[in-house]
C-alpha cells in the first residue's frame, strides 16, 4: 500500500457484525508513501498503523454510512 497525508482508509470488520473502521492518514512514516501511517479514526482514536490485508484506501465515490 502507498498512501499520502489526507487520504482516508478503511479497515474491514473481520467477524460477522463487526463494523468497518474509517480513518484519515495524518503522517506517512515509511519511504515513498509506504507504512507505517499515523491514522486518526473517526472515533478520534489515533494510532501508528501497519495495514494488513483487511485495510484499503477509500475512494471518493465510497461512503461510510
Image (cartoon, grey):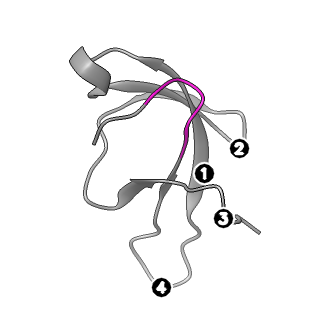
Counting from the top left corner in percent of width and height, residue 2 is at 31, 36
Q: For the residues labelled 4 and 3, say whether their Cβ atoms are less than 8 Å apart.
A: no
Q: Give me the C-alpha separation between circle 2 and circle 4.
A: 21 Å
Badge 3, how many Cα within 10 Å: few under 14, some, many 20+? few
Q: Which residue is mark 4?
A: 16
Determine the residue positioned at 57% across, 55% down.
21
The reply to whether the magenta stretch includes residue 30 is: no
Instruction: Choose between 23 and 2: the one closer to the eye.
Output: 2
| Residue count near mark 2 (Cα–Cα under 10 Å), binned few <14, some 14–19, many ≥20 | few
Instruction: Tell me which segment is drawn in magenta.
Output: 4-8
Q: CA distance from mark 4 to mark 3?
A: 25 Å
Write down the residue under mark 2: 42
Q: Earlier in the sequence, mark 1 or mark 3?
A: 1
Point out residue 50 in the picture as x, y percentages from the top left corner.
29, 35
Circle 4 or circle 1, nearest the eye: 1
Marks 2/3: CA distance?
18 Å
Query: Do the CB atoms of the residues marked 2 and 3 lie less than 8 Å apart?
Result: no
Q: Which residue is mark 3?
A: 61
Q: Position of residue 6 (x, y in %)?
A: 60, 28
Q: Is residue 38 above or below residue 41?
A: above
The quarter of the picture where residue 42 lies is: top right
Residues under labels 4 and 1: Cα distance?
17 Å
Which of the 4 quarters of the picture holds residue 23?
A: top right
Amino acid at each position: 500500500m502507498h498512501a499520502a497525508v489526507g487520504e482516508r482508509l478503511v479497515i474491514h470488520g473481520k467477524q460477522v457484525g463487526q463494523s468497518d473502521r474509517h480513518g484519515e492518514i495524518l503522517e506517512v512514516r515509511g519511504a515513498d508513501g509506504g507504512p507505517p501511517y499515523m491514522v486518526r479514526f473517526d472515533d478520534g482514536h489515533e494510532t501508528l498503523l501497519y495495514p494488513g490485508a483487511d485495510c484499503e484506501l477509500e475512494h471518493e465515490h465510497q461512503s461510510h454510512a
